[in-house]
Amino acid sequence: MLKESFILLDRMGPASELKIWKSGVANWDAFRETKRVAGIAVLRKGFYDRQLDKAEAALRAEEVEHFASVLPPSQQWRLWEQFKDQAVFLDIETSGYYGDVTVVGLYDGLDTKTMVRGITFDKEVLKKELAQYKLLVTFNGRSFDVPVLKRYFSEVIPDIPHIDLRHVCAKIGLTGGLKVIEERLGITRPTSIAGLSGADAVFLWQQWKATGDHQYLEKLVQYNEEDIVNLKPLAEYAIPELWKQVRMPKA
């Protein structure tokens, strides 16, 4: 997926990328081996060759920061296949007020880690934890989770590529909230938290703070865990579907 992508080249848009594919140039190697690519001037072709050399070197060295800088945010989903085993799925809960973070959930594809405000949440620990990963995956995280964490806990989020699955899903016709999309794809949740929404998460936090009854906190943590765990099967479905759509668009 990544090594077939030309969208990372300077001033390269989707239409130009599609023309390259249609000309029979399928990947970085083929591009560099081809002396002339239709629609690309000789000097620019040499410039693009050098850009692809840099991308190849960055990929070998797993320098994801390079791709965070050359791939538009809307195209960073193309890194999924290369870095999915080094991805972290993230979701936060708040008390209902913007920035008032109550729970931060992280999932590496195998295990979940939950940080609760006033109990296990620590800015430096979160920063150290996130620094281990090469790819950040969220649902609506570009609009909410990441801006909130950056604003109130500066320098916590590393400068790595970010896949927001809300936008990936929208491009393949899966619109609405996470729970709506999960239902459409047959991704289920335990009956104990099925049907709960973000508003319910706020209520659970308020009840926990008001009563000290751990059942409210446990349910909130479970709700957050499902939010992050379910992002993995969503990514595994939506990203390949979007790639098919981009690679072989319908006439």
Image (cartoon, rainbow, N blue to C red):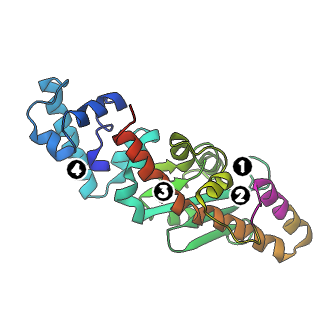
Q: Who comes first in sequence, dot 4 or dot 2?
A: 4
> Does residue 31 appear anywhere in the picture?
yes
Q: Residue at x 64, y 46 (%)?
A: 144
Mark earlier in primary sequence (3, 4): 4
As helix, strand or loop, the secondary structure at mark 3 comes to: helix
Determine the CA span between mark 3 and mark 4.
27 Å
Residue 199 lies in magenta, yes or no? yes
The part of the chain drawn in magenta is 194-205
- Asked whether the beta carbons under mark 2 and mark 1 sit within 8 Å of each other, the answer is no
Q: Is residue 136 above or below residue 24?
A: below
Left or right of 239? Residue 89 is right
Q: Earlier in the sequence, mark 3 or mark 2?
A: 2
Q: Amino acid at mark 4?
A: Glu
Q: Is residue 241 above or below residue 21?
A: below
Which SS type dominates the magenta stretch? helix
The residue mark sitting in front, 1 or 4, is 4
Is there CB contact under 8 Å for labels 1 and 4? no
Q: Is residue 161 visible to us here?
A: no
**Amino acid type for the residue under numbered disc 3:** Tyr
The mark closer to the camera, 1 or 3, is: 3
**Tags 4 and 2 touching, CB below 8 Å:** no
Between discs 1 and 3, the one toward the N terminus: 1
Q: Quadrant of residue 142?
A: top right
Q: Residue at x 76, y 74 (%)?
A: 218
- Rounded to the nearest angstrom, the CA distance separating label 1 from label 3 is 31 Å
| Residue 93: mark in rendering | 2
Which residue is tagged 4?
56
Q: Amino acid at mark 2?
A: Glu
Q: Which residue is mark 3?
A: 237
Q: Position of residue 12 (x, y in %)?
A: 31, 30
Residue 42: x and y in percent read 12, 25
